[in-house]
Amino acid sequence: MTRDAEVRSSSSAPLAARRRGVAGWVDVRGRRLGGVAFILNRITGLGVLFYLYLHLVVLSQLAVGPAAWDSLLKNWFLNPVFLVLDVVLLAGLLIHGLNGIRVALVGLGLVVSRQKALLGAAGTIGAIVLLIGTLMFISHGG
Amino acid sequence: MTGRVEELPEPTGQSLPLPERWAPPEERETIPGVSWAWQAITGVLLLVLLTLHMIANHFVVQGGLRDYQQVIDYITNPIILPLETLFLVVVSWHGLLGLRAVIFDFGLSARAERVVTRVFLAIWVVTVIYGVSLLAILVTRR
């Protein structure tokens, strides 16, 4: 594949969605279950990327010193509001990760005829892990 | 291809080598590109690295999050340091590649897409330099 061809084909959106731009992939009308999963993957991906850079900025407080970090921990991160945000983050990671596995499997031509079953399995596993994770967040306090 | 077809491929959100009968011509993609392969490879790596990161930093720590001294002890572990460095490299690559795909959905020209690719490559390099520098600072504080 030439460089230009690679650049042209590197967007991961379906062709019809690409023709309509971003409005194409946020428009849920007429989409099947997999279409909603695609939109969820995009939204959770953007959310997790935003969190990643926020996380990297916050980690700079470690370079400032123990007082700065421990104060941030005590006054902010162990707050119940952040506990809820931790659960939201875990949910986003699970949706993106598990749906990503499904997309990769289907993209490789594996279990293509069982997309709905794959979605069901991903949803079930995700819900169980989210429940366990939430309980652990609560029991550990953050 | 055998097996029951449950769903058309339009919503899967990736370049798929699917049987032509599953999609109308305008929905058919070419073979998965290099970017798709990178996204899948880094995605699989992240399943392991992110799971380790979440467990080590959120689920097994007394109190929920590591205080300053616990972070220093954790990051100076000779097994953890290369794993966290690899995590930084892989997660930033995966995230920026995903955002690049979203931007490509706006329907940019091939030239604009090349510019976006170079900008994102630069952001990735800066991110890795920042993260490794931070790790280096913390390691020297043991």
Image: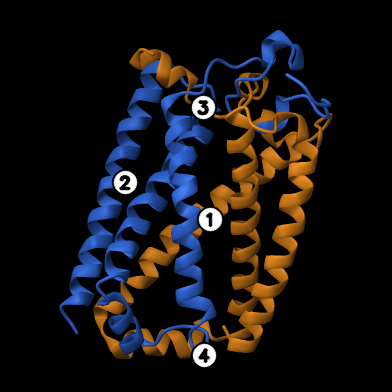
Chain colours: A orange, B blue
Compute the Cα span from label 3 to label 4.
Answer: 42 Å
Amino acid carrying label 1: it is Val
Q: Where residue A18 appears, x then y in whole percent? A: 60, 23
What is the distance, in whole Å, between disc 1 and disc 3 at their CAs? 19 Å
Residue B62 horizontal/vertical position (percent): 50, 90
- Local packing at callout 1 (Cα closer than 10 Å; few below 14, some 14-19, many 20+) is some
Where does label 2 land, which residue? B124
> Under tag 2, what secondary structure?
helix
Q: What is the C-alpha distance between the residues marked 2 and 3?
A: 18 Å
Chain of the residue under label 2: B
Answer few, some or many: residues within 10 Å of disc 3's Cα (few below 14, many 20 plus, some between 14 and 19): many
Residue B117, quarter of picture? top left
Residue at image mark 1:
A48
Q: Which residue is mark 3?
A: A11
**Residue positioned 74% across, 33% down in the render:** A27
Q: Amino acid at mark 4?
A: Gly
Name the residue beneath numbered marker 4: B63
Q: Position of residue B138 (x, y in %)?
A: 23, 76
Query: In the image, what residue type sits under mark 3?
Result: Ser
Q: Could you tell me how far apart the alpha carbons at marks 2 and 1 are, in whole angstroms? A: 16 Å
User: Do circles 2 and 1 both sit on a common chain?
Assistant: no
Question: Which chain letter matches label 4?
Answer: B
Relative vertical location of residue A74 with respect to residue B125 in this rendering, above or below: below
Query: SS at mark 1?
Result: helix
Secondary structure of the residue carrying numbered label 3:
loop
